[in-house]
Image: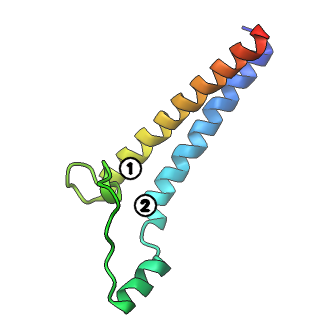
Amino acid sequence: MSKHKKLNQKTIFIGLAIALIFVVLGVFFFSYALETLDLKAEELGLEAEPIYDPPFPDYNLLGIDNQWSALIIGGVSVFLLFVVAFGVAKLLSKRKHNQ
């Protein structure tokens, strides 16, 4: 394997690890931060009305409202976004080489 390819793989793994660290930090440390807009809406007596039904409202999995479900959804989301971005990059790379 070439040195350039090993460097690219190392960069990808480091990026994924950092993204997963941010998911863990977000779930366990920053998820309790107060939302200013939510507080103001409560003060005014307003309630949220969603435009659509999201698949995972408030990052809850199957009605389980805890940190572990948010961690699972966050981790899966990181990998799904990575796969999509990697696929687009590969397609663009092939397209560039074919021109």
**Residue 29 image offset from top left, x and y in percent:** 47, 65
Mark on residue 80? none
Identify the residue under disc 1.
71
Name the residue: 76% across, 16% down.
96
**Residue 28 image offset from top left, x and y in percent:** 43, 61
Q: Check the picture and name the quadrant holding the C terminus.
A: top right
Name the residue: 30% across, 48% down.
55
Residue furthest out toward the bottom: 43
Tag 1's secondary structure? helix
Q: Residues within 10 Å of mark 2 (few under 14, many from 20)?
A: some
Question: Could you tell which of marks 2 and 1 lies nearer the N-terminus?
Answer: 2
Q: Check the picture and name the quadrant holding the N terminus.
A: top right
User: Is 84 located above or below residue 52 in the figure?
Assistant: above
The answer to whether mark 2 and mark 1 are in CB contact below 8 A is yes
Q: Residues within 10 Å of mark 1 (few under 14, many from 20)?
A: many
**Residue 41 image offset from top left, x and y in percent:** 40, 84
Tag 2's secondary structure? helix
Name the residue: 63% across, 38% down.
15
Question: From the viewer's perspective, is 69 left or right of 41?
Answer: left
Name the residue: 20% across, 55% down.
63
Q: Amino acid at mark 2?
A: Phe
Whole-Å distance between the Cαs marked 2 and 1?
A: 9 Å
Q: Amino acid at mark 1?
A: Leu
User: Is 95 located above or below residue 86 in the figure?
Assistant: above
Question: From the viewer's perspective, is 60 left or right of 4?
Answer: left
Marker count (numbered):
2
Q: Quadrant of residue 42?
A: bottom left
**Residue 48 image offset from top left, x and y in percent:** 33, 73
Identify the residue under disc 2.
28
Q: Quadrant of residue 64?
A: bottom left
